[in-house]
Image (cartoon, grey):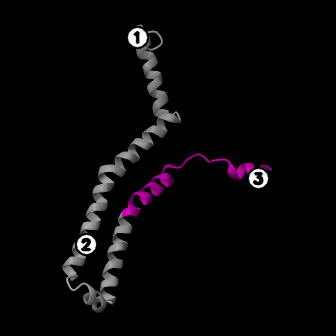
Amino acid sequence: MGIGRALLKQSKPKLWLGGLRDMIQRTQAYYAMINAGLLLITTYTVREATIHEYAPWMTWPVILGIIALMMLTILIVDYKWVYPSQIAFHQHEAFKHRSMIRQQLDGIEKKVDILLGVKNGK
């Protein structure tokens, strides 16, 4: 029982490990874009004759345009909606779980209330 509890107990957090995981997660969308682009290029190269049978308008510039449009769309969605939501979530979790910064702000607020003579934040 002692070994199991020791294994399940969280260790003191290391910043570099969390930072590495965060960076890997943030860059996965870009790796996926590159992978999708390479898959499209490979598929077009291997099946060019078959593609031209059914879609003669599908040329290299069109394929590259599709890839560029996909990448641009993902970047815009990430910048406009995903990234702000991610920041808001991290701030919400830090506030909810009593981060050190929040504790310091509470202490400063109490001192300011004492200096101003305010009772119970009113």
Instruction: Provide the residue span drawn in magenta.
Output: 1-29
Residue 99 visible, this orientation: no
For badge 2, the amino acid type reads Ile
Kind of residue indicated by mark 1: Leu
Q: CA distance from mark 1 to mark 2?
A: 62 Å
Mark 2 or mark 1, which is nearer the start of the sequence? Answer: 2
Q: CA distance from mark 2 to mark 3?
A: 55 Å
Q: Tell me where residue 26 appears, x and y as whole percent.
A: 40, 57
- The residue labelled by disc 3 is 3
- State the residue lying farthest toward the front: 54
Look at the picture and state if 92 lies above or below 14. above
| Residue placed most toward the observer, 59 or 38 | 59
Residue at left offset 45%, top offset 33%: 101
CB of mark 1 within 8 Å of CB of mark 2?
Answer: no
Which marked residue is nearer to the observer: mark 2 or mark 3? 2
**Label 1 packing within 10 angstroms: few (<14), some (14-19), many (20+):** few
The reply to whether the magenta stretch includes residue 12 is: yes
Asked if residue 7 is among those painted magenta in the image, a careful observer would answer yes
On residue 87, which mark appears? none
Q: Most extreme residue toward the top, as rendered?
A: 117
* Most frequent secondary structure within the magenta stretch: helix
> Quick one: label 1 or label 3, which is nearer the N terminus?
3
Is 120 situated left or right of 81 in this image?
right
Whole-percent x, y for residue 86 in the image: 40, 47
CA–CA distance between discs 1 and 3? 51 Å
Q: Residue at x 29, y 67 (%)?
A: 70
Q: Where is mark 1, residue-wise?
A: 115
Tell me where residue 84 appears, x and y as whole percent: 35, 46
Amino acid carrying mark 3 in the image: Ile
Q: Which residue is mark 2?
A: 66
Asked if the residue under mark 3 is in contact with the one under mark 2, i.e. CB atoms within 8 Å, the reply is: no
